Image (tube, rainbow, N blue to C red):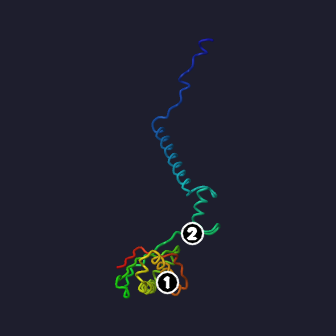
Amino acid sequence: MAKQDLDIDVEAERPVKASGPLKWYLIGITGLLVIVAASYATLYFAGIVGTPGAPGAATAEAAATDKPGAAPKLPPLYLPMEPAFVVNFIANPNARFLQINLQVSARDPLVLERVEKHSPAIRNTLLMLFSNQDPVVLNSRDGKEDLRQRTLAEVNRTLQEQTGSAGVEDVFFTSFVMQ
């Protein structure tokens, strides 16, 4: 082989390097693409974005409804009934009073607005209910749970009488003190 066949032009095969502003522009674009891809991947695996029928979307829809094909169920909303309910016990000398803080729960904000609007009637009904309780029965968990269920029924009954519709899903005792 001749010497001229082995001569390789080293300068011709060297890649062109970016320099100056072009180099920073390419680094910025690359960084932006990495951030967008990471954000999309996070949202995709969280089930927030994706194609219909994707595993994350199906799971979110199934969790939000009670029945297949039903409209998504709204999250529960809570309304504290303030101030606390305080009633005296007359029949039992061992317990003199009961203090209950409670919150009502509904998924429709209009139901909570009606509860708030008619709270004087609801509070009256609940004060009558609470004052007729036996403190010995209320010392047990079953007694408290029974009172909670009766409270829910009375709230819905009073709301039905006042507005023509009920809608409170649950009642929660957030504080329960007997002394």
Q: Position of residue 85 (x, y in %)?
A: 39, 81
Which class describes the residues within 10 Å of circle 2: few (<14), some (14-19), or many (20+)?
A: some
Residue 133: x %, y % from top left? 43, 84
Q: What's the residue type where badge 2 is placed?
A: Lys
84 relative position to 29: left or right: left
- Percent coordinates x, y for residue 138 in the rendering: 42, 79
- Disc 1 is placed on an element classified as helix
Q: Quadrant of the N terminus?
A: top right
Q: Does residue 69 lie above or below 112 as drawn?
A: above
How many numbered discs?
2
SS for callout 2: loop
Q: Locate residue 174: give its quadrant.
A: bottom left
Q: Nearer the viewer, mark 2 or mark 1?
A: 1
Cα separation, mark 2 vs mark 1, equals 25 Å
Residue at 54 percent across and 81 percent down: it is 166
Q: Earlier in the sequence, mark 2 or mark 1?
A: 2
Which disc is residue 60 wearing? none
Q: Residue at x 50, y 78 (%)?
A: 149
Q: Nearer the viewer, residue 169 or 177?
A: 177
Q: Is residue 15 above or below residue 111?
A: above
Q: Quadrant of residue 8?
A: top right
x 42%, y 83%: residue = 134
Q: Nearer the viewer, residue 5 or 57?
A: 57
Which residue is tagged 2? 73
Q: Amino acid at mark 1?
A: Glu
Residue 154's tag is 1
